[in-house]
Structures are given as C-alpha cells and as structure tokens.
C-alpha cells in the first residue's frame, strides 16, 4: 500500500516540476513557478522518506544541509548569485558521484544497465563538480578569468575521456570477463580481479581532472554558457544515479534539469552567435582580439552629471540597458530610484535585457527584481529592439559587447553575427562605465565613437545617484 502511495506522490511531484518549469519561462509567473517546483520537491523528499527506517541519520543530514543553505542564502549578495549557482551545480554533481559510488561499492555485482548508469553518473558528476569549482573561481576572481590553454590540451582531454570510458567498461565486467580481457593483452590479474573500489576510485580521479581541464580553457565571457551547461550535466548525473538506485522521481527530476539546462545552453549559444563546440574549445579572451574597428581612432565625447541630468529632464522615453557594470557596483537600487523619478515626471521608462548580459542567464532580471523594479518594465532583446529609433535616451550601464555595432557591421570582428541591442539607433545614448577598458571580447566598442553617444565615466552606483540628485534640482 505504501509503495502505491509513494508512486502517486512521485507522479504528483513530477507534475509540479513540469508546471513549475513552464511558469518559470515568463517573468510575471516566475515566482509562482518557483513555488510550485519547490512544493514538488517537498513531495518528492517526503515520499522518499516513507520507505526509510533510519530517520535519525536522514533528518540530521537535512538539518545540517538546510542550515548551511539558509546561511549562504542570507549571506550571498545578489551580485554574487552567478558564483552561488556555479557552486550549487558542483554540489549536485558531487552528490550524484558519491551516491552512485556508494551504491556500486555496496553491491558491485549488479546488472549491466545499473553498472553503466553508475559509471556515467560518476564520470559526469566528477566533471560537473570540479568544472563548477573552476567556474566559481573565474567568476570570483580566484582563478584567472581568461582562457588557460597549453600545447596538447585537447589531445590530453581526449585521452583522459577514453580512459574514463574504459574504466566504465571494467565496472561492467565480472571476474571471468575481466580475466579473459587482461589475458588477451598478456596481463595477469593474479588470484583476484581488480577490486571494485580501486576501479571506481580511479574513475573518480580521472573525472575530477577532466572537469578542471574542460573549463580552464573557457574565458570569462562564456561563463553564462558554461553555467547553464554544467547545470545540465548535474541533471544528467542525477538521472543516471536514479537509474542506479531505481528511483523514479530522481530519474524524472534529473531528466528535467538536464533537458532544460541543455535547451538554455542552446539559447545562450544562439544569443552569442557561437557554437557549443567553439565555446568548449576556448572562446573570447584566448588572446587579444582585433577587428577593423580597432584600426580606427574612436573619439569619445564625455559628459558630466549636470549635462546628463539636463538631457534626462527633457526626455519623454528612456530605455535602460543594464550590464555587468551595474552588478559590480550594486547599482540596481540607484537605477530603480532613477526609473521612479523619471516616471513621476512623465517619462516612459523600460529596461532592455540581453540574454547574456552579466555572468549567468537571467542575471540582470534577478538584480532588477531584487530592487523591486516591476516585471512589466523588463523587455527581452527581440521585444524591444525595434523601439530604439523612437527612444529619446538609451542609458547603457556597463553592457559592452552586447551593444557593440561591430557585431552587425564588421565581418572581421570576433563578435560578428552576435545579436545585439540596437541602442545605437536611439536619438541619444549615454554610457556609464568605470573605465574605457575593453569588454570580454577584447575589442573596442564602435558605439562609443558614434555622434549620438556620450560617455559618463564613473562607478555606476555613484554616477546614477549623482544623476538623480541633479535631476531633483530641476524638479
């Protein structure tokens, strides 16, 4: 009876997962979707506990894990959310690795399909764990953000991956099959076959090294793609662990995470006009990039806060384009103050969000939501690009490569073909940047030399706050 009730709860949890993910696809329903998915996870955990007897150990783990999660949830700043997501992906990977390994060591003589599931779970889980740690390090500035490439790196990756596949094959063999295989190559096993713990430990080591080697050649500009890809990996590893444990809800949950993460990765690649293979083999930041725009001298016209405030005071329509500069300066609350002030004086204010602005998918949406900026003011790139010719002022806050017209005009540019926000078509463009340094693509932004573009240098939070103060003088 408990078994049937448990399966019913699993089915119900799966429905909540699917509906929750569906509602996460729209800004207005995202919060409700998150609640539905969370409730589905509660049902899944509750159902799994119905058939357990060792509640003391399980509840102790839940208590310790929840305490750590609550602590970090309260301590991690919204600007550090990409790092948090990266490390959580890693935790998912290592969890799958440990559970699958423990299950195999508990009973090494399992069916072929279970052995394969264990091997894949360990391999992908290990890659996800160390790969996520490297991604975290790059985002946090602990590890060099630019690509780290050495001669023969890709060949070494292939060799390590091939060895890992061979180790998975050994996991699937029993003693007689293994003895015959090694005897074919003239090698003896002695009295006993290779211990199961020796094989699984070797596979773990190779998977952990592969995770490091896979992510270090990827530059900081591609971190949004890497994070979504690692998220997909963690889901696949969880699904494989579900097969090893014969746990239906773990299979469903892992498959949903793996599929949605892969779809998101595809969306990110399309948004950057990059192939996934191009990203994985090392992208922007591998070396100093050059384009024909670098050959031209870009004349930058600077503007003061007083001059900028005079322009905003007469503007009827404003589109704000947030980028990583806003995140670093934690300027989202100052941006909200500017938006509210402009609306009170009768201006139309909208926010244009590029899919890869910031350090992870949805980074800008999260920051703006944290500042209580209404969802109705947030517009995706395709929804707002046609409006820029009718906009009085486009305010760009640190978004460099995603506003560079070279993506449309310069065939030699490394970002050529990447969809961008058409801010250069606005009547006036004001760019807030801390410095004139290049973006992650390593090239100058043609936009800064356009006649309608003015540069307002300074920390985003201070610059926007000063702009609001100046505007209040005219009120």
Image: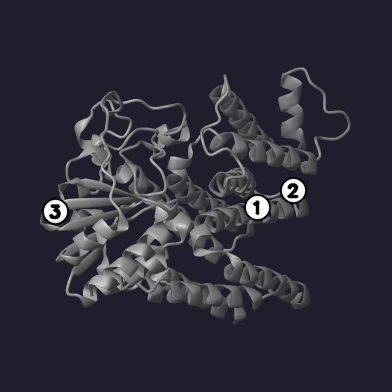
Q: Tags 2 and 3 in contact by the CB under 8 Å rule?
A: no
Q: Looking at this view, is 441 or 62 the one in front?
A: 441
In front: label 1 or label 3: 3
Say whether residue 376 is left or right of residue 158.
Answer: left
Colour setup of the view: one colour
The span from disc 1 to disc 3 (Cα, nearest Å) is: 45 Å
The quadrant where residue 472 appears: bottom left
- Indicate the position of residue 385 as horizontal and vertical percent values: 18, 53
In front: label 2 or label 3: 3
**Callout 1: few (<14), some (14-19), or many (20+) C-alpha neighbours within 10 Å?**
many
Say whether residue 277 is left or right of residue 247.
Answer: left
The residue at the point 43 percent across, 45 percent down is 225
- First in sequence, mark 1 or 2: give its number: 1
The span from disc 1 to disc 2 (Cα, nearest Å) is: 20 Å
In front: label 1 or label 2: 1
The residue at the point 36 percent across, 62 percent down is 464
Say whether residue 328 is left or right of residue 45.
Answer: left
- Indicate the position of residue 307 as horizontal and vertical percent values: 24, 57
The residue at the point 35 percent across, 32 percent down is 443
Q: Which residue lies furthest to the left in this view?
A: 390
Residue 386 — which label?
3
Residue 41 seen anywhere in this rendered image of the structure: yes
Q: Is mark 1 on a helix, strand or loop?
A: helix
Residue 189 — which label?
none
- Indicate the position of residue 69 as horizontal and vertical percent values: 63, 68
Q: Name the residue under label 2.
A: 108
């Amino acid at each position: 009876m408990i078994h049937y009730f448990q399966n019913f709860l699993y089915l119900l949890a799966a429905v909540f997962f699917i509906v929750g993910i569906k509602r996460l696809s729209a800004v207005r329903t995202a919060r409700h979707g998150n609640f539905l998915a969370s409730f589905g996870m509660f049902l899944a955990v509750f159902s799994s506990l119905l058939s357990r007897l060792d509640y003391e150990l399980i509840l102790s783990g839940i208590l310790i894990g929840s305490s750590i999660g609550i602590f970090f949830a309260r301590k991690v700043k919204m600007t550090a959310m990409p790092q948090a997501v990266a490390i959580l992906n890693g935790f998912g990977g290592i969890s799958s690795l440990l559970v699958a390994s423990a299950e195999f060591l508990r009973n090494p003589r399992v069916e072929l399909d279970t052995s394969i599931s264990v091997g894949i779970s360990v391999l992908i889980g290990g890659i996800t764990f160390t790969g996520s740690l490297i991604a975290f390090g790059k985002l946090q500035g602990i590890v060099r953000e630019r690509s780290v490439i050495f001669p023969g790196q890709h060949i070494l990756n292939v060799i390590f991956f091939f060895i890992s596949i061979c180790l998975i094959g050994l996991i699937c063999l029993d003693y007689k099959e293994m003895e015959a295989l090694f005897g074919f190559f003239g090698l003896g096993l002695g009295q006993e076959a290779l211990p199961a713990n020796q094989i699984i430990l070797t596979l773990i080591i190779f998977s952990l090294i592969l995770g490091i080697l896979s992510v270090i050649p990827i530059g900081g500009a591609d971190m949004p793609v890497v994070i979504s890809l690692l998220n997909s990996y963690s889901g696949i590893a969880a699904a494989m662990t579900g097969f090893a444990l014969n746990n239906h809800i773990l299979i469903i949950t892992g498959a949903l995470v793996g599929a949605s993460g892969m779809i998101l990765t595809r969306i990110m690649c399309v948004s950057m006009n990059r192939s996934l293979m191009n990203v994985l083999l090392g992208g922007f930041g591998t070396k100093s990039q050059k384009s024909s725009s670098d050959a031209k001298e870009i004349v930058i016209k600077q503007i003061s806060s007083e001059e900028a405030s005079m322009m905003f005071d007469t503007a009827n329509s404003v589109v704000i384009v947030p980028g990583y500069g806003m995140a670093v300066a934690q300027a989202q609350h100052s941006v909200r103050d500017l938006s509210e002030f402009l609306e009170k004086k009768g201006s139309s204010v909208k926010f244009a969000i590029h899919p890869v602005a910031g350090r992870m998918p949805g980074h800008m949406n999260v920051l703006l939501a944290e500042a209580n900026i209404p969802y109705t003011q947030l517009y995706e790139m395709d929804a707002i690009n046609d409006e820029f010719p009718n906009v009085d002022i486009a305010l760009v806050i640190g978004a460099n490569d995603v506003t560079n017209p070279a993506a449309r005009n310069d065939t030699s540019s490394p970002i050529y073909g990447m969809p961008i926000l058409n801010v250069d078509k606005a009547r006036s463009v004001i760019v807030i940047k801390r410095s004139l340094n290049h973006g992650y693509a390593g090239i100058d932004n043609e936009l800064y030399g356009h006649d309608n573009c003015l540069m307002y240098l300074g920390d985003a939070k201070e610059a926007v706050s000063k702009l609001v103060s100046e505007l209040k003088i005219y009120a």
